[in-house]
Image (cartoon, rainbow, N blue to C red):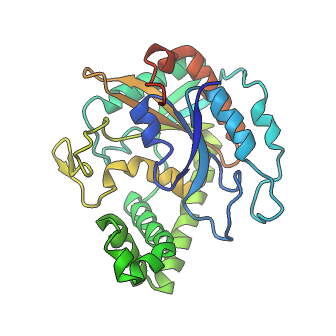
Amino acid sequence: MLPVADGSDYMGSLRNPAAFCNVWGFRPSTGRVPKAGFVAQLGEVGPMGRSVADVALLLSVLAGPDPGHLMGRAEDPAAFAGPLGADVRGTRVAWVGDLGGRLATEPGILELGRAAAGVLESLGCVVEEALPDQDLDDLWATALTWRHWNALELEPLYADPATRALLKPEIVWEIEGGLRLTALDVTRALAARQRWLDVLAGFFACHDVVLAPSAQVFPFGVGTHWPAEIDGRPMDTYHRWMETVAPWSLAGTPVLGMPAGFDGRGLPTGVQLVGRPGADLDVLRLGQAYEQATQWVRRVPPPAPS
């Protein structure tokens, strides 16, 4: 079996790295992998690997049910270790691209995403460009509030001057944002997230899966702290350049980060395959069909771990 690993995805940590490394990353449905807490926070633990089969096999180990996780899913995770072959013809795919021009994208990102959509069409899927009827400013503000709220778990590190000095500026910014939140701010964020879930329920009545870019930029140099602008458009926060993942983190739906090819410099990118809540296995099966049609990892293998 090829190497696999697991990580926690708050805002693309299983999707951006997969896109930048030409491998697969899977963010499971909320509750699929046990975690503490009664509130659906953004982070989900999921697998990464060089094939969909490896990713699914690791998910079968990570997934619940767990009697200590009251909000978990009861399905037997052994299903993820079984065959993934399926007839995907007729699957309805919504390509959302740059969300109607909202997202700044590096030239070449959307073209490779559309090519991935073309692969799904060649498999018999029905692909159309479509957008959920959602206030995207409201959605982004909700994502920021949720991250500030999540960051408060690190408040003890911030409270101690010695450890605060060791925190990177972005974490300090998140924690301080959390400290400014009121109960009303959190209540409004909860209501906004529920509005988004209601919108998606209607969207998924017309579409089986969503296809979106995994990243808005190609891999950048280690000396770049984070992209300050994309194609001439400035980024107003340290994570605005990865806004493409935020809607699906908030949704708690299964998302498979899939390789989507390379630009003229040989730099990779990926796409997100987003399924209905709980439809993790269906997403992996469609991803398996896409993998067999493209074989991006075999065509350009990532370096072996040392």
Residue 147 left/right relative to 263: right
Residue 286 visible: no
Residue 52 left/right relative to 175: right
Rendered image quadrant of residue 25: top right
**Residue at screen point 50% across, 56% down:** 10
Q: Position of residue 163 (x, y in %)?
A: 38, 75
**Residue at screen point 59% across, 54% down:** 44
**Residue at screen point 75% across, 58% down:** 72
**Observer-nearest of 70 and 293:** 70
Image quarter in which the N terminus is found: top right
**Observer-nearest of 293 and 121:** 293
**Residue at screen point 58% across, 52% down:** 200
Rendered image quadrant of residue 282: top right
Q: Is residue 85 above or below residue 149?
A: above
Q: Is residue 95 above or below residue 112?
A: below
**Observer-nearest of 241 and 115:** 241
Q: Position of residue 206 (x, y in %)?
A: 61, 40
Q: Position of residue 12 (x, y in %)?
A: 46, 48
Q: Position of residue 216 (x, y in %)?
A: 33, 41
